[in-house]
Image (cartoon, rainbow, N blue to C red):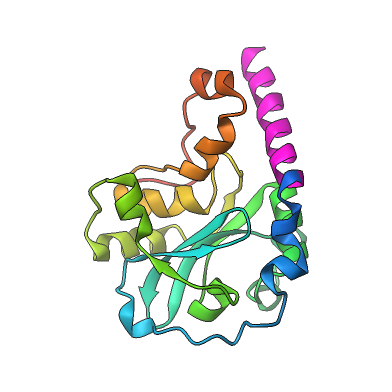
């Protein structure tokens, strides 16, 4: 009974957070197609770097794999609607993203730096400073990310892009953004352990 109540509370909190951050998914917030031709100095990125893209209310994270490629966990409704790789490999639109969050389905996918950034500025390894954790070697970080490519579950609170990159870089799935959100329900944070992330393994 306690677990099912916890799941209901968690689901409600996620939906409230989603609704409160709808501006994040609006076309004006991400510049749907404008500004996506920005130039990024990929020579300054090292394989295994955590790349951060600030959004309106949240930050999106990925692992740089080299050769202008970034692995990142991205919600996408098309993953439950079709197996057509031609369609699912296209850049995820805001509508696909929003519906993917609602149905809790995502993939760890590889995109170009430009498609990953979606017109925003990129910061490199800011988590190293804020988390003050010892990072794994960059090659191990990249290899972990590559092993996790494919379909996975999605949750704003329990399995998001930040959980993915912190698992790859530090060996532990963490999300300071989600922790801040759980502040609104302190009893939830104190009574449940972070569940094993779908497919995340050493």
Q: Can the viewer see residue 158?
A: no
Is 100 drawn above or below residue 18 in the view shown?
A: below
Residue 112 at what x, y percent from top left? 51, 79
Rendered residue at 77%/61% (across/down): 81
When the figure is inspected, residue 94 is found, relative to residue 102, above or below; the finding is: below
Q: Residue at x 64, y 21 (%)?
A: 6
> Does the segment drawn in magenta span residue 7?
yes
Is 33 placed above or below 10 here?
below
Magenta stretch in the rendered image: 1-19
User: For this view, does 74 lie left or right of residue 127?
Assistant: right
Residue 188 left/right relative to 80: left
Q: Residue at x 71, y 50 (%)?
A: 21
Residue 80 coordinates in the image, percent (x, y):
73, 57
* Residue shown at 35% from the left, 49% from the top: 130
Closest to the observer, 117 or 147: 117
Q: Which residue is most to the top?
A: 1
Name the image quarter holding the N terminus.
top right
- On the question of residue 128 being in view, the answer is yes
Give whichever of 177, 173 is nearer the camera: 177
**Magenta segment includes 99:** no
Q: Position of residue 88 (x, y in %)?
A: 67, 71
Residue 86 placed where, x, y %? 67, 79
Quarter residue 50 falls in? bottom left
Q: How many marks?
A: 0
Report the predominant secondary structure element of the magenta stretch: helix
């Amino acid at each position: 009974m306690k677990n099912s109540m916890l799941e209901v509370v968690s689901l409600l909190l996620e939906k409230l957070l989603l609704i409160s951050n709808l501006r994040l998914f609006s076309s004006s917030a991400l510049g749907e197609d404008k500004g996506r031709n920005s130039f990024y100095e990929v020579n300054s990125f090292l394989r295994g770097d955590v790349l951060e893209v600030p959004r309106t209310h949240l930050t999106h994270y990925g692992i740089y794999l080299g050769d202008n490629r970034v692995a990142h966990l991205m919600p996408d409704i098309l993953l439950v609607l079709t197996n057509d790789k031609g369609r699912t490999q296209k850049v995820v639109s805001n509508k696909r993203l929003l519906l993917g969050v609602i149905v809790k389905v995502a993939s760890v996918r590889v995109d170009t730096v430009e498609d990953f950034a979606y017109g925003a500025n990129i910061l490199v390894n800011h988590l190293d400073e804020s988390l003050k954790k010892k990072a794994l070697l960059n090659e191990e970080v990249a290899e972990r990310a590559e092993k996790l490519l494919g379909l996975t579950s999605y949750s704003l609170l329990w399995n998001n892009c930040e959980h993915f990159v912190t698992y790859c870089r530090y060996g532990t799935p963490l999300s300071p953004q989600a922790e801040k959100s759980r502040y609104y329900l302190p009893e939830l944070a104190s009574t449940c352990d972070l569940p094993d992330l779908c497919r995340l393994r050493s």
